[in-house]
């Protein structure tokens, strides 16, 4: 397939955009990356490609748009099935990976965002506690899913690695902005090592945003959100 037949419509600070890009890298699919500057407004291309949610990422395969990052990862896995598998082959393991991916999107990452947005110290502390509790659960899940191997997916990066790992940039930026340690040798040693392996993997390192750049962007977004009382559009 020619390069222009696969496009990812994303945005550099977006953890969700990374999911599509890592999955394509795992499958060695060439693609064109189109960066949206969401904070300056949405392009016609985005509004046409994702008229329901109007969000990135969107994968464009030929003339077909596919929306929602986890659905995109599954589509890539099924479409380029001759490459390394991303979802576990066992139905129970697949269900568990999907369970944790939903937990990350619905509960855990919103708490990370709350650390930055919280105006009151009590709210900030509560958000930090929620993130830390989640990390302890994920440390346990890593033991069960990875079974002693380097990644949640085993010997190679899989679905849950992508679902969780895409948030590591924002986790590190939050640590930097708030002066706290969320991943630590004492509480989450396995996840700390996993994070290092994930970020230096060949399929990830070129799409993982720089922590300082994210932190600077985060400060700008938080100031805007606090001012407007609105939601973060990362
Ligand atoms: N559930 C979506 C979340 C995507 C998302 O929140 N994208 C943000 C950027 S990180 C976005 O496009 N925001 C624009 C908006 O909310 O209007 C997914 O997994 O793809």
Image (cartoon, helix red, strand yellow):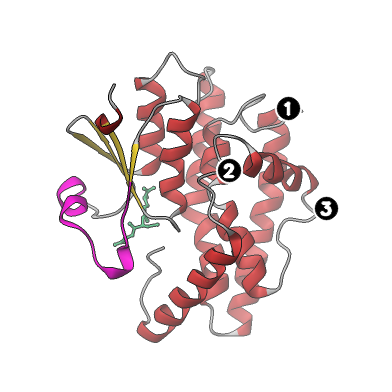
Q: Which residue is mark 3?
A: 185
Query: Taking 90 as reference, is 141 left or right?
Result: right
Does 21 sit above or below residue 30? below
Q: Where does the image place residue 45, in percent across and percent down from the top left?
A: 18, 50
Magenta-drawn segment: 34-51
- Secondary structure found at label 2: loop
User: CB at mark 3 closer than 8 A to ligand 1?
Assistant: no
Residue occupying image coordinates x 61% and y 66%: 174
Does 158 sit above or below residue 109? above
- Secondary structure found at label 1: loop
Q: Would you call the spot at circle 1 few (<14 residues within 10 Å), some (14-19), or many (20 or more)?
A: some
Q: Where does the image place residue 22, in percent across and percent down from the top left?
A: 48, 37
Observer-nearest of 226 and 46? 46
Cα–Cα gap, marks 3 and 1? 18 Å
Residue occupying image coordinates x 51% and y 66%: 113
Q: Would you call the spot at circle 2 few (<14 residues within 10 Å), some (14-19), or many (20 or more)?
A: some
Residue occupying image coordinates x 68% and y 59%: 132
Q: Which residue is mark 1?
A: 149
Residue 205: which disc? 2
């Amino acid at each position: 397939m020619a390069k222009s037949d696969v496009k990812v419509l994303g945005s550099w600070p977006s953890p969700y955009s990374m999911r599509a890009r890592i999955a394509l890298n795992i499958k060695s699919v060439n693609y064109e990356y189109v960066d949206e500057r969401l904070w300056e407004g949405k392009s016609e291309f985005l509004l046409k490609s994702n008229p329901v949610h109007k969000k990135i990422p969107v994968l464009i395969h030929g003339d077909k748009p596919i929306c929602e990052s986890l659905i995109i990862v599954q589509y890539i896995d099924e479409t380029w099935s001759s490459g390394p598998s991303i979802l576990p082959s066992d139905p129970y393991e697949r269900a568990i990976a999907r369970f944790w991916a939903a937990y990350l999107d619905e509960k855990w990452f919103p708490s990370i965002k709350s650390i930055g947005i919280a105006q009151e110290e009590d709210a900030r502390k509560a958000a930090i506690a929620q993130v830390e509790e989640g990390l302890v659960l994920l440390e346990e899940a890593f033991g069960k899913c990875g079974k002693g191997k380097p990644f949640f997916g085993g010997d190679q990066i899989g679905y849950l690695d992508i679902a969780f790992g895409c948030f590591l940039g924002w986790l590190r930026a939050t640590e930097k902005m708030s002066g706290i340690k969320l991943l630590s040798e004492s509480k989450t040693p396995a996840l700390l090592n996993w994070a290092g392996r994930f970020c230096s993997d060949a399929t990830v390192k070129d799409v993982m945003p720089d922590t300082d750049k994210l932190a600077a962007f985060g400060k700008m977004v938080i100031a805007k959100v606090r001012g407007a009382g609105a939601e973060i559009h990362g």
